[in-house]
Image: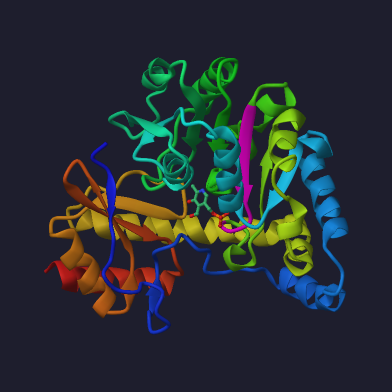
Amino acid sequence: STFYEITPTFNLDEPRMLARLSANENPYGPSPTVRTAIKDAISLGNRYAHRDAAELIELIAEKEGVSTKHIMLGPGSSDLLEKVAFVSFPAGGNIVSADPAYMSIISTARALGAIWKPVKLTADYAHDLNGMKEAIDADTKLIYVCNPNNPTGSITNSDQLHQFCSDASSKVPVFVDEAYLEFLDDSQSHSMVNLVADGADVIVARTFSKIHGMAGLRIGYIVAQPERIASITDKVRSTMGLCSTSLKGALASFMDEAFLHECKSLNSSCRKYLVEEITSLGYEVIPSYTSFVLFPIAMNGQAFMKGMYEEGVSIRVFSIEDQPFCRVSIGTMEEMEYFVEVFKKVTA
Ligand code: PLP
């Protein structure tokens, strides 16, 4: 792979940042109903949160059309990506994924001694499903698919992905990371979760960090075969890492469809504005279906990031085949306008 992140030499998380556009956070959340639910839950803080976890699991199971045994919660999907890596690579092996991909599970797999088998995205930034099928060998322990993909923001045709996951999971477990699923129109139809209901060895990950605007509250879940879930919970703790305030918040957020709809709608109008502005400056933005966009820039990546940072704008920079790309999260319209203003100045 020639893909890597150009890491900043400064702290993108500084409080003085005027527009935090580096971590694909939702600028509107958590919703008012979530804030109230969390306030009400504070007094229950003396109790372990197992019952709240069970309540959320029941709600998720009902929504996803599976049993409660098919669900595992974690403090963010990062925790579940890690736990799946821990149980998948006790003795090396390899992990097949797209390139570029969201590197979390791949980095953990590599740290445990596994080898990454990267398969380049197609020319239109979809997963190369035939290429990925060919990359599977006797040492493959896990296939990782991120749809929509990060850092590209692109999607893979869901019918083709469905077929791929169905075929491949008869040989190797397939992990499908759907962190940005809810930003798609008719999002549930793009999910691979019905494969789990049909018995396939597919692990679908979701998070409350993106559309729900709860990144700092740390709740995510996976949907997988009960044996697959048990293979994790036999070895590591599950609900012990969760807090009742966040669980109550997640329960409330699940019910707040109006808020989720509003976030999706604001995200798409701000994204549309941003893409039009950047395109009019002569840049080729990769069509995005998420809460961020990626586009190639025409200057040194480190210098670009520093220039933006000095004006209080945090973004991320990736190098793909020696070409630096800017990844900018979709913030509020005000933040998008400020980004465009600073971008013009820095690249002038
Ligand atoms: N998966 C993808 C594709 C992501 O982009 C992110 C966060 O940016 C995560 C997982 C992890 O999110 P969290 O641990 O907050 O659920």
Q: Quadrant of residue 344?
A: bottom left
Quarter the N terminus occupies: top left
Q: Is residue 235 visible?
A: yes
In this picture, residue 219 sits left or right of residue 146: right
Q: What residue is drawn where x is 41% and y is 55%?
A: 292
Q: Look at the picture and state if 4 lies above or below 162.
A: below
Question: Residue at the bottom extreme?
Answer: 16
Q: What secondary structure predominates along the stretch shown in magenta?
A: strand
Which segment is the magenta one? 202-210
Place residue 163 in its image quadrant.
top right
Q: Position of residue 348 (x, y in %)?
A: 11, 69
Q: Which residue is depicted at the point 28% across and 48% down? A: 4
| Residue 316 falls left or right of residue 33 | left
Number of numbered discs overlaid on the protein picture: 0
- Image x and y of residue 63, in percent: 77, 42
Which residue is depicted at the point 15% across and 66% down?
347
Q: What's the colour scheme?
A: rainbow
Picture quadrant where residue 314 is located: bottom left
Looking at the image, residue 93 sits to the left or right of residue 57; the answer is left
Q: Position of residue 59 (x, y in %)?
A: 82, 48
Farthest front residue in view = 91
Residue 149: x percent and y percent?
44, 41
Is 308 placed left or right of 212 in the picture?
A: left
